[in-house]
Amino acid sequence: MIPLDEARQYVLDRVARLGSARVPLADAAGLVLAADVVAAEQVPPFANTAMDGFAVRAADVASVPVTLEVIGTVAAGSTLDGAVGPGQAARIMTGAPMPDGADAVVMVEKTTLDEAAGTVLIDLSVSEGNHVRRAGEDVEPGDLLFAAGTVLTAGHLGVLASVGVQDVECVRRPKVGVISTGDELVDDGRPLQPGEIRDSNRRTLLTLVAEAGWEAVDLGIAVDQPDTIRDAFAAGAVECDAILSSGGVSMGAFDYVKVVLDEIGDMRWMQIAIKPAKPFAFGLIDTTPVFGLPGNPVSSMVSFELFARAAIGFMAGHNDTDLPLLRAISEDTLGHGPDGKTHFLRVEGRIDDTGRWHVHRAGGQGSHQLTAMARADALALAPDGVEIEPGDEVRILLLR
Ligand code: AMP
Ligand code: MG
C-alpha cells in the first residue's frame, strides 16, 4: 500500500493544464482566466445621482429652508437640457446623470415640490458631492480588473459586463468522459436477472463532473470483454480531456479493464492506504488522463474526491490542489483497529452558532452503502490506530 499523499502527487505530476480559448461571458461562469483583464472603460461612465431627489448647487442650500426654481426633470437614461444655475434645482432620479452646474443631491424626502409654482422647498443642507457617484469611482480605464488565474464567479462576470467586455480568454472547460465497466451492470430499468445490479456509478460520476462545472460525456457501460473495453476507452480518449472509469481496478479474475488499459495506455495500478477506495489506477492513453476508480459505489465517489477533483481542477486552471480539510468536533466515537489505513467515514454535520462544524456518522459505512454517502455532508478522516472520542477534534473533507 502507498500513502494517499504519494498517490495524489503521482497523479498531479502527470496532468497538464488545458489550453485556453476566447469564451463569451454567457459561457464563462466557473472558468479560470488565462490572461489578465484590463479595463477599457470607466465605471460609472458619468457622474450620477445615488438617490431620487433634487440636483442643487451646495452653496445654494447652505442655509435652509430655501426655495429653488425647478428647471426640469432628469430620469435615468436621459440628460438635462441646460444647466442648473444659482437659485435653481433639477428633479433627478437614481442613476440619472448630474446636470451641469449642480454639485450635490438632496434626497426627495427632505424636499417639498410645489408643481404649480415650479419651485421646491429644500429642508436640508448638503455639502458638495453629496449623493453623487463620481465617474470612474469603481473602475478607471487601464485598471487591472482581474489577474490570470481568477475563477470567474457571478460578481466577476458582472464587472466584466459593466465595462463592456464581450468575451474573455479562459482555460478550456474540461470535457470529462465517464465509463462503467462490468458484466453485471444494467442501466435501462428492466427487471434484474440473477447476478445483475444497476449501474449507479455512472450517474453519480456524471453528476459530480457536471457539478464541478466541467462538461460531462456519457461513455456508457463497457462489458468485461476486451474489444468493447478497448473501443470505449480509445474513443473516449480521443473525444475527452480526461476519462473516469469505475470498476475493474481491483483483484477480480475477469477484469479485462486492466489488460486492455495496460495495452493501450501507460497505467499505474495502486493500492492506497485508505478505506474505502483502496484500489486505484491512473495513467495516460496518449495524452488523456485516465482515472481508474474502484467499482464499489462509495469508493468511486471517494476516489473522485481524493484524486479526480484536484487533478482535473488543475487541468482547468485551478492552482490549489490541496485537499480542503476543515476541523470539526466529532459527536461519535470514530476509529478502527490498526490496519495501516486512513478511513474516510461518511458523516452528517451542522455548524454551531460559533461557526464550528459538529459531525456524526451518516449511516452504514460499507463501501457498497451509497445511502450514507448520499446523506453525508463530509468525509471524516480517522487516522490509523487513533480513537476519536465524542468531543474530540476530527478533520473533515466537505462534500461539495
Ligand atoms: P469491481 O471493481 O469491478 O470489482 O467492482 C467492485 C464492486 O462494485 C462490485 O460489487 C461491482 O458489482 C460494483 N460495481 C462496479 N461497477 C459498478 C457500477 N457502475 N455501479 C454500481 N456498482 C458497481
Ligand atoms: Mg467489475
Image (cartoon, helix red, strand yellow):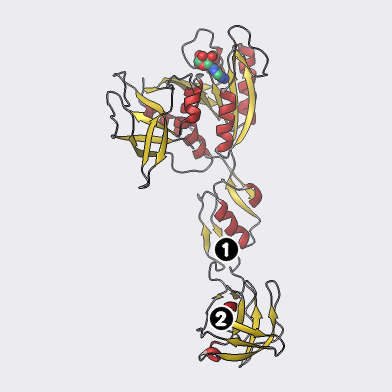
The Cα atoms of the two marked residues, 2 and 1, are separated by 38 Å
On residue 255, the disc is none
Q: Is label 2's Cβ within 8 Å of ligand 1?
A: no
**Between 155 and 334, the one nearer to me in the picture:** 334
For the point 51% across and 43% down, the residue is 317
Q: In which quadrant of the rendered image does the N terminus lie?
A: top left
**Between 240 and 4, the one nearer to me in the picture:** 4
Name the amino acid type tagged 1: Ala
Query: Residue 320: x and y, percent?
Result: 44, 42
**Between 318 and 155, the one nearer to me in the picture:** 155
Circle 2 packing at 10 Å, graded few (<14), some (14-19), many (20+), is some
- Residue picked out by circle 2: 110
For the point 55% across and 52% down, the residue is 35
Circle 1 packing at 10 Å, graded few (<14), some (14-19), many (20+), is many
Of the numbered discs 2 and 1, the one sitting upstream in the chain is: 1
Query: Residue 266: x and y, percent?
Result: 51, 22
Q: Is residue 311 above or below residue 268?
A: below
Quadrant of res 5: top left
- Residue picked out by circle 1: 39
Relative horizontal placement of residue 334, taking residue 117 as reference (left or right): left
For the point 56% across and 71% down, the residue is 136
Residue found at the far bottom of this picture: 86
Query: Residue 46: x and y, percent?
Result: 61, 74
Relative horizontal placement of residue 16, taking residue 199 as reference (left or right): left
- Tell me the SS state at disc 2: helix
